[in-house]
């Protein structure tokens, strides 16, 4: 049975429950690793296991690799402008599934086991709550489409582009909000809820803006970068409010469709609809399988009060 940190607001100090005791123990060990004894200097490998290393450095390194792969496999070859099956599936596998989902989940698992964050804070909730939040979010997005469809009255065009961008939306939510945002919040948690939320939002928004710049390097202007940053901040705040990885993925993907209005041709996307659908199902299926695995092996039990 895996040890289970208690649930709670990541912006608040841990309470007197299991996570509080375990978190204190971890911070004590990390202090020893950072300072070390007089005769035992800290080596780089040990430093990577410190609070700063695992909560700041590792997530930022992974985010940098993900942004670079985004440019290398999608931005530079412009896969979205002409979504051929081979290029689209390769980008989905390497950038969205492997770097965008699998590696972040591995780092989240480590954060869970060390007591830095629990599954509620990381957005992996119960099936009932996930279905409810995702359904409500999809309904809100669809109402927004009815009111302001970037493709006019052609709703199938919106669906096609949405499916094309779904793997990117899931990976963006996982890397920017769930991984980087939550880890930054855990790092500054003792400074209070407001500081934790602001810090997590700022880092998530910056990574989101940089990733979209990597996606469309030829179309980005200072104004569009500011729009990307604002959209990233909105996505992060939504995630910190609902704490659901599926709901935020739905929101991020919808935001991507509106942000890329005029840059993508729905007709080109529809020509490769089988590959687009396969890539979307592959990415969503991977996240669903990992969610099932985490729910079976890693649980969060609220600490008793009193």
Image (cartoon, rainbow, N blue to C red):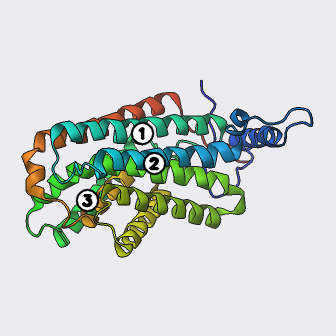
Q: Secondary structure at mark 1?
A: helix
Among all residues in the image, which is located at the extreme right? 38
Q: CA distance from mark 3 to mark 2?
A: 25 Å
Q: Which numbered disc flags the more N-terminal residue, 1 or 2?
A: 1
Location of mark 1 (residue): 99
Q: Secondary structure at mark 3?
A: helix
Q: CA distance from mark 1 to mark 2?
A: 9 Å
Q: Tell me if mark 1 has few (under 14), some (14-19) or many (20+) residues whose alpha carbon lies within 10 angstroms of its own.
A: many
Residue 261 drawn at (x, y percent)? 21, 66
Residue 219 drawn at (x, y percent)? 28, 66
Q: Tell me if mark 2 has few (under 14), some (14-19) or many (20+) residues whose alpha carbon lies within 10 angstroms of its own.
A: many
Q: Are marks 1 and 2 in contact (CB under 8 Å)?
A: yes
Residue 289 drawn at (x, y percent)? 36, 31
Checking the image for residue 175, the label placed there is 2
The structure residue drawn at horizontal position 71% and vertical position 54%, both measured from the top left corner, is 13
Q: Secondary structure at mark 2?
A: helix
Location of mark 3 (residue): 139
């Amino acid at each position: 049975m895996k040890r289970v940190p208690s649930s709670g607001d990541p912006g608040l100090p841990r309470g007197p429950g299991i996570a509080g005791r375990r978190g204190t123990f971890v911070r004590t060990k990390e202090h020893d690793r950072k300072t070390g004894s007089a005769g035992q200097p800290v080596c780089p490998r040990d430093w990577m296991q410190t609070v700063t290393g695992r909560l700041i450095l590792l997530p930022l390194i992974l985010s940098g690799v993900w942004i670079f792969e985004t440019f290398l496999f999608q931005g530079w070859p412009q896969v979205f402008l002409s979504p051929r099956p081979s290029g689209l599936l390769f980008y989905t596998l390497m950038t969205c599934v492997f770097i965008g989902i699998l590696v972040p989940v591995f780092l989240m698992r480590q954060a869970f086991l060390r007591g830095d964050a629990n599954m509620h804070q990381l957005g992996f909730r119960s099936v009932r709550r996930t279905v409810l939040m995702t359904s409500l979010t999809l309904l809100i997005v669809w109402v927004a489409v009815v009111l302001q469809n970037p493709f006019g009255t052609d709703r199938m065009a919106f669906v096609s582009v949405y499916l094309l961008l779904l793997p990117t939306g899931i990976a963006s939510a996982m890397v920017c909000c769930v991984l980087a945002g939550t880890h930054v919040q855990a790092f500054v948690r003792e400074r209070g809820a407001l500081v934790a939320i602001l810090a997590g939002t700022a880092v998530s928004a910056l990574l989101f803006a940089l990733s979209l710049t990597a996606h469309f390097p030829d179309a980005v202007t200072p104004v569009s970068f500011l729009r990307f940053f604002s959209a990233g901040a909105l996505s992060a705040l939504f995630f910190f409010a609902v704490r659901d990885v599926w709901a935020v993925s739905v929101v991020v993907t919808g935001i991507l469709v509106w942000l890329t209005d005029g840059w993508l041709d729905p007709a080109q996307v529809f020509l490769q609809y089988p590959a687009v659908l396969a890539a979307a199902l592959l990415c969503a299926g991977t996240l669903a399988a990992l969610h099932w695995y985490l729910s079976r092996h890693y649980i969060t039990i609220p600490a008793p009060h009193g």
